[in-house]
Image (cartoon, helix red, strand yellow):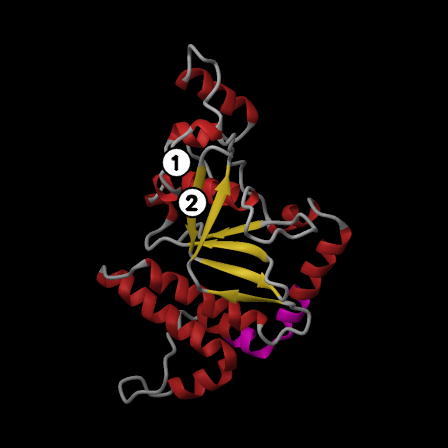
Amino acid sequence: MSNPDVPACRDEWKSQVATAFPREGRPPIPSRINWHGGSNMSHVQFLSLRGIWPTLVSGSEFAREFETELRRELDTARNWLDLFPPFRAYLECVRNNQSTTFWSPEAPGTSETALSLGIMQLARSRQSGLFKAISDGVADEEMVISSLISFLDGITVLCPHVRCGWSARRQSITGDFGAQKLKVFVDGLLVARDGTPKVLLEAKRRCRQYCEPKVCLQETGEFVAFLKSTTTPISHDRHFFLLSQNQG
């Protein structure tokens, strides 16, 4: 990700602060800001959260950032998916640009393809519907998150190693800064069995490139609000993730 309006490192953040606050030399502290929600996050508010957006890394680089246990879990999940027949059939549909839905007279043969997809059938069907809605200019965020959750459920529900579940429930999270509070809404969650959120979901109806820098500012507000929340259970392993579309 490269966006001149969003700092990618500490030095860029300090440079933007110096430009935005030439007299003060620093942004206001969060407890003195009148917040208007994550979707209306301003650049000044973003700077006050000391947010940066570093360059995206590859999956292997991402895994190396964490300890052996998490890396082993990622490898286990990858190996299981490689041998999961419905996911292999799904990938074949994607490679062939094959749109599968439930059987219809206008699309003979799709019933056989759908059967081979198994639990991934719903995900591919909703993706096909979403692609058509995007082409027709009628897609919305609810369709995007529904398609995403269907895919995530498809690759996790039957996996014996998964101990969490995906939820499409739009949840509010309030970050407590003392005198002021930042209330945000996330589009979905990955929740552990004890109710602890592990991943926040954020989706847009268009490709990310058309939503910048607003989406970066919004996601930063969501993540900080989650960390500063006094009501949302916080995982003791200190691993938090925000899953957001990159290319659409």
Residue 35 — which label?
Answer: 1
Look at the numbered disc 2 and give the secondary structure of its residue: strand
Which amino acid lies under the numbered mark 1 shown in the image of this protein?
Answer: Trp
Q: Residues within 10 Å of mark 2 (few under 14, many from 20)?
A: many
Magenta region, residue range:
78-89
Q: Is residue 158 above or below residue 108?
A: above
Give the alpha-carbon distance from disc 2 to disc 1, as whole Å. Answer: 8 Å
- Indicate left or right for 52 with 158 as reference: left
Q: Where is residue 222 in the image (x, y as percent from the top left)?
A: 47, 45
Picture residue at 57% right of the left edge, 62% below the top? 191
Q: Is residue 166 left or right of residue 205?
A: right
| Residue 119 vertical position relative to residue 136 in the rendered view, above or below | below
Secondary structure at badge 1 equals loop
**Relative horizontal placement of residue 131, taking residue 149 as reference (left or right):** left
Q: Residue at label 2?
A: 183
Contact check, label 2 and label 1, Cβ < 8 Å = yes
Q: Which of 196 and 55 is in front in this view?
A: 196
Q: Is residue 101 magenta?
A: no
Q: Nearer the viewer, residue 40 or 88?
A: 40
